[in-house]
Image (cartoon, rainbow, N blue to C red):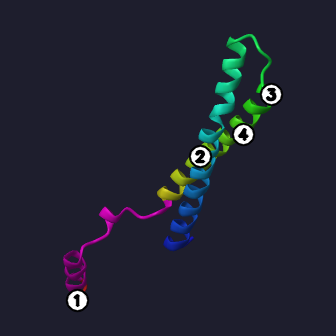
Amino acid sequence: MTQSEIIELENALDSEKLTLQSQLNSDDYKTIKNAEAQAAGKSLPYDPDELHAKHQAWRDRINEIEDEIKRLKALKPDPDDEPTDGQRNEETMAMA
């Protein structure tokens, strides 16, 4: 896998992660409405099992994405390990 392919995949995964986090955040109101209804002794407006399953699936996918991003970062060379121009010149001179 090339450096640019790794970066492209990281960007796609980051975008998917942000989308899932946004969905979780925007769906929080349903959990809050259920808690308010329960505290008031009223029926729940949203199915808690369905909400939990959906939210857990999103969280699980976010965790998978984070693991994949870590794996991709490990494939990228560390820029600190790259020889500087001066080091490259010294190596070339030593070979001559």
Residue 53 is situated, as x and y percent measured from the top left of the image, at: 76, 33
Q: In the rendered structure, which disc, 4 or 1, sits on the residue that comes first in sequence? A: 4
Q: Are marks 4 and 1 in contact (CB under 8 Å)?
A: no
Pointer 2 local density, CA inside 10 Å: few below 14, some 14–19, many at least 20: few
Q: Which residues are magenta?
A: 75-94
Q: Amino acid at mark 3?
A: Asp
- Magenta stretch containing residue 77, yes or no? yes
The picture places residue 3, in percent across and down from the top left corner, at 49, 71
Q: CA distance from mark 3 to mark 2?
A: 20 Å
Q: Which residue is mark 3?
A: 47
Q: Which mark is residue 57?
A: 4
Tell me how far mark 2 sits from mark 4, CA to CA: 14 Å
Amino acid beneath label 4 = Ala
Q: Nearer the viewer, mark 4 or mark 1?
A: 4
Q: Residue at x 59, y 50 (%)?
A: 17
Callout count: 4
Given residues 95 and 19, the one toward you in this image is 19
Q: Amino acid at mark 2?
A: Ser
- Magenta region's main secondary structure? helix
Can you give x and y, in whole percent of width and height, for residue 22 in the image?
Answer: 59, 46
Where is 17 relative to 42, above or below? below
In the rendered image, which residue does mark 1 sit on? 96
Taking the spot 74% from the left edge, 37% from the top edge, the residue there is 54
